[in-house]
Image (spheres, rainbow, N blue to C red):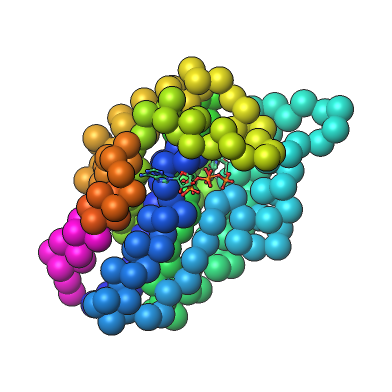
């Protein structure tokens, strides 16, 4: 079976961490063991530094929405060129915790950055590179905020308003409806149900695309 780049997407608290483990277990069950993991922003030394800047900012300096967007893209292209593409070329499978769809949803939807700028960056920086499969964990924003509220320290984005998460989710749903490589999974359900769905959906997809 051809190796693939599989991405998990969704709002905070949608269960991406668990979903990554479920995807790995499903792959292992069918004999796929050469698996790498990435998270965005992050997973290269530069991208991890950018991750810290994005999440916690800089004292006394407001990070503009466009600067935030550019940092996500700087981190992403480092990751694609230095980690993801080489891994795929070596026949490894890559499981990504977030990718470009996060920028489209959070910055394009939540931050309302113009679709013109979003498209320019997407087209010129990614140059056609995209995941083979994206599993989007769809969750009601109110539930996602409930799930993360016990965290000791919330980052800049987690502190955003409910409206921000509504707009972000709306854009996720819109983009998922337009792209058959994005599969929407109901993450409002119980954890065992979500795991079962991921397992079934992934197996069906891989079997139907078997090469
Ligand atoms: N971002 C990122 C952008 O704005 N633009 C971009 O381009 C990119 C790449 C990243 C932040 O950056 C933003 C998005 C984020 O705000 P992060 O720390 O990586 O920051 O944040 P997240 O990726 O959102 O990670 P989280 O840990 O917050 O979310 P998870 O992994 O989805 O949540 P998880 O699995 O830890 O679950 C949270 C809790 O809910 C429970 C879990 O057990 C856990 O306690 N839970 C469930 N409970 C009941 N039923 C279920 N179905 C459950 N699923 C999970």
Residue 144 in the image, given as x and y percentages of width and height: 45, 33
Vertical relation: 131 (above or below) 61: below
Q: How many marks?
A: 0
Q: For the C terminus, which image quadrant?
A: bottom left
**Residue 56 falls in image quadrant:** top right
Vertical relation: 190 (above or below) 33: above
Residue extending farthest top: 163
Answer with left or right where residue 185 lies relative to residue 61: left
Q: Of helix, strand and loop, which mostly describes the magenta segment?
A: helix
Answer with left or right where residue 43 lies relative to residue 16: right
Residue 116 in the image, given as x and y percentages of width and height: 47, 27
Residue 60 in the image, given as x and y percentages of width and height: 86, 27
Is 158 in front, or is 93?
158
**Residue 159 falls in image quadrant:** top right
Residue at the spot x=20%, y=64% of the render?
Answer: 203
Q: Is residue 68 visible?
A: no
Answer with left or right where residue 66 lies relative to residue 63: left
Q: Can residue 27 be seen in this view?
A: yes
Answer with left or right where residue 133 lies relative to residue 91: left
Residue extending farthest left: 208
Question: Does the magenta portion include 205?
Answer: yes
**Residue 210 falls in image quadrant:** bottom left
Question: Does the magenta portion include 105?
Answer: no
Give the magenta range.
198-211
Residue 190 in the image, given as x and y percentages of width and height: 30, 44
Residue at the spot x=62%, y=40% of the render?
Answer: 151
Q: For the N terminus, which image quadrant?
A: bottom left
Residue at the spot x=59%, y=37% of the render?
Answer: 150
Residue at the spot x=38%, y=55% of the render?
Answer: 19
Residue extending farthest right: 60
């Amino acid at each position: 079976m051809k190796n693939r780049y599989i991405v998990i997407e969704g709002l905070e608290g949608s269960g991406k961490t668990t979903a990554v483990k479920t995807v790995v277990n499903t792959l292992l069950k069918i004999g796929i063991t050469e698996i790498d993991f990435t998270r965005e922003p992050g997973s290269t030394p530069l991208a991890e530094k950018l991750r810290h800047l994005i999440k916690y900012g800089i004292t006394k300096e407001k990070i503009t929405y466009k600067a935030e967007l550019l940092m996500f893209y700087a981190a992403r292209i480092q990751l694609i060129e230095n980690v993801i593409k080489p891994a795929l070329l070596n026949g490894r499978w890559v499981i990504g915790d977030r990718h470009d769809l996060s920028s489209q949803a959070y910055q394009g939807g939540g931050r309302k950055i113009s679709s013109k700028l979003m498209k320019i960056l997407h087209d010129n920086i990614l140059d056609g590179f995209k995941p083979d499969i994206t599993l989007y964990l769809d969750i009601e924003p109110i539930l996602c905020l409930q799930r993360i509220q016990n965290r000791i320290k919330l980052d800049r984005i987690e502190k955003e308003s409910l409206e921000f998460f509504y707009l972000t989710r709306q854009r996720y749903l819109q983009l998922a409806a337009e792209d058959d490589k994005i599969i929407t999974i109901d993450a409002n359900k119980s954890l065992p149900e979500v795991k079962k769905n991921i397992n079934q959906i992934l197996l069906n997809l891989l079997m139907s695309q078997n090469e």
